[in-house]
Image (cartoon, rainbow, N blue to C red):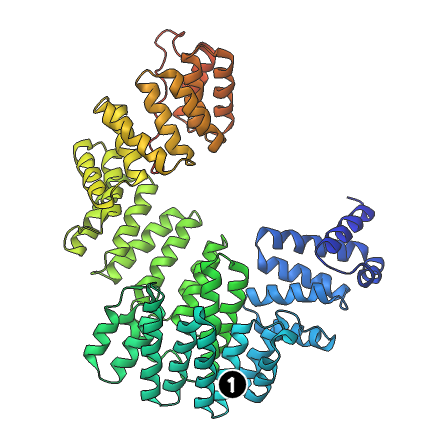
Amino acid sequence: MSVGLLRSIALSAAIATGLSAPNLASAVDAAPDGFAAAYLAGHIAERRGDSAVAAERLGAALELAPETPALRRRVVRLQLAEGDFAAAAVGAEALAALGDDNFPVGLVQIVQRFKSGDFAGAAEMANDPRAHGLSTVLALLAKAWASAGAGDVDGGAKMLTDAAKKMNGLKVLLTLHAGLMAEQAERPELARWMYEEAIAASEADQRPASGRLIQVVAGFYDRMGQDEAAAEARAIDGAQTERPEDTAAIGRIVVSPAEGLAEALYNIAGSLFTDRQYHQALIYVRLAAVLRPNEPATLFTIGQILDGLGRPREAADAYRAIPALGSYGWRAPMRVAESLSDAGEEEAAIEAMRAVLDTAPEQPEPAIALGHMLRGAGRFKQAIEAYDEAIARKGGAGDEDGWLLYARGVALERSGDWPAAEAEFLKALDMLGDEPLVLNYLGYTWIDRGEHLERGRAMVARAVELRPDDGFIRDSLGWAEFRMGDFEAAAASLERAVALQPLDPIINEHLGDAYWRVERYREARFQWRRALSFGPDEKQKPVIEEKLQCGLDGCPAAAAPATKANGDGG
């Protein structure tokens, strides 16, 4: 590629992402190939989600265009996402010197002030959040914790409780922080009152209390020696991201105002993560780790976000950094194994998960996860053994174990033990009700085996009603209709399935079969060619090739239409 073309592409990409052309002109003119190559490499890496490479290459481009705030801001964001706070702080100071206080400059600066104990400076920033690119919620929490850091705990708590009256949707978060603030300042009665308010607000919202709230409140009562109150808190139906039983091992979550701000950053990161705003969430949680480096839930969330960003190897590294406190002693290694599996390191993942089973001999979760891994690897008999181990650790399958029985049923069916698999699917349906995946799997398999044809077709049709946009389930209905000889209906159903999952080789093959049976021969061959182009497995490929040569019936001793690979999704 010529330097001129490279320069043109780089400038276009830079301007499209908000960089100023005049600020770039001198850098590009002075070193057109150097800037353009670095910028484009960083831009592509950022689009690909590779923050480490993006930070390094865009940083190199920044050296050639140091007076470009928009580019520096991008680099600072990437450095924060990678956990390089020292470099991000230098970049934020340079931006502030240029008069740029946009996100994330103010965020970095307020973290620096809390880290150094400059609570007056932090409060000054929080007083004018817009000028520093701070969200209203974070600014409020920062101002309250800065007040506590300056010695005015009552004033900080009052800020939060007053705001909670006006910001009803944030009442749980704000009163929780008021309680943390009071407990950190050795004000147990005020802490108790705030925690009770947070629990009451959660109940008023008619939403499950968060695992974090339960963990904090249960831990408080533990430390107060109030075992009955602690047990009642643990009995609250919460989403156990953080487990209340970890409170003794982990201890107090907040022991200083700086850790109070860290908790606020962690809470905001959790909300962003729930909303799948992974890049923003990663910045907030990395900053939380700056103020509270070894807090297990913070590090666990970093791993979860990296998993969400499709960076499983880096997620595994994040989980490895978690201290072995409480349930994190086995939950973090379990997530390491799952991340290795996501990274395609199948054998390493299975061995790592087997090690977790030994580490946590009473926990069923690692055995279930191992079963899923083995089933995904096609090692069905071993998967059954893992599921059996999980059920044994549970003391038998309960009413809440429908999905476990479904998974075990799939492994049993794939290993050739249909009677046992059928029994598991029926029990799973009793527990889960009209669950589309179970309806689809059992109904399709009955039809494929020539058993309970009408009931099986009704099950698959019900699954389609429940998930009309699931191409795999729609394919099951079409294939069921094909197997029952209703070829016109099959063609219509399979056309819809192909529209929903256009690149699946099995669905395209099925549609070709249906077209052949309704004498649409040219279209049938077209679909079979499509099926071949989408990479069918080695068993499926020669069957499709023979159909292309001879149709469904034309070759002597021709193979029957390929049996549907009855995957978990239908």
Q: Quadrant of the C terminus?
A: top left
The structure residue drawn at horizontal position 72% and vertical position 53%, both measured from the top left corner, is 16
| Residue 332 point in image, percent of width and height | 36, 63
Please determine whether, in this image, residue 534 is positioned above or below residue 13: above
Q: Is residue 301 left or right of residue 484?
A: right
Other-residue count near label 1 (Cα within 10 Å), few / some / many at <14 / 14–19 / ≥20: many
Asked which quadrant contains residue 565, the reply is top left
Q: Is residue 447 left or right of residue 528?
A: left
Q: Is residue 21 left or right of residue 275?
A: right
| Residue 416 point in image, percent of width and height | 22, 31
Q: Residue furthest left?
A: 395
Residue 259 visible in the picture = no
Please determine whether, in this image, residue 561 is positioned above or below residue 200: above
Please determine whether, in this image, residue 502 is positioned above or below residue 44: above
Identify which residue, 442 or 89, lies in the foreground.
442
| Residue 566 point in image, percent of width and height | 33, 32
Amino acid bearing label 1? Ala
Q: Residue furthest bottom?
A: 151
Q: Secondary structure at mark 1?
A: helix
The structure residue drawn at horizontal position 63% and vertical position 58%, both measured from the top left corner, is 54
Residue 535 visible in the picture = yes
Q: Can you identify the residue that label 1 sits on? A: 146
Identify which residue, 555 or 423, lies in the foreground.
423
| Residue 424 point in image, percent of width and height | 19, 40
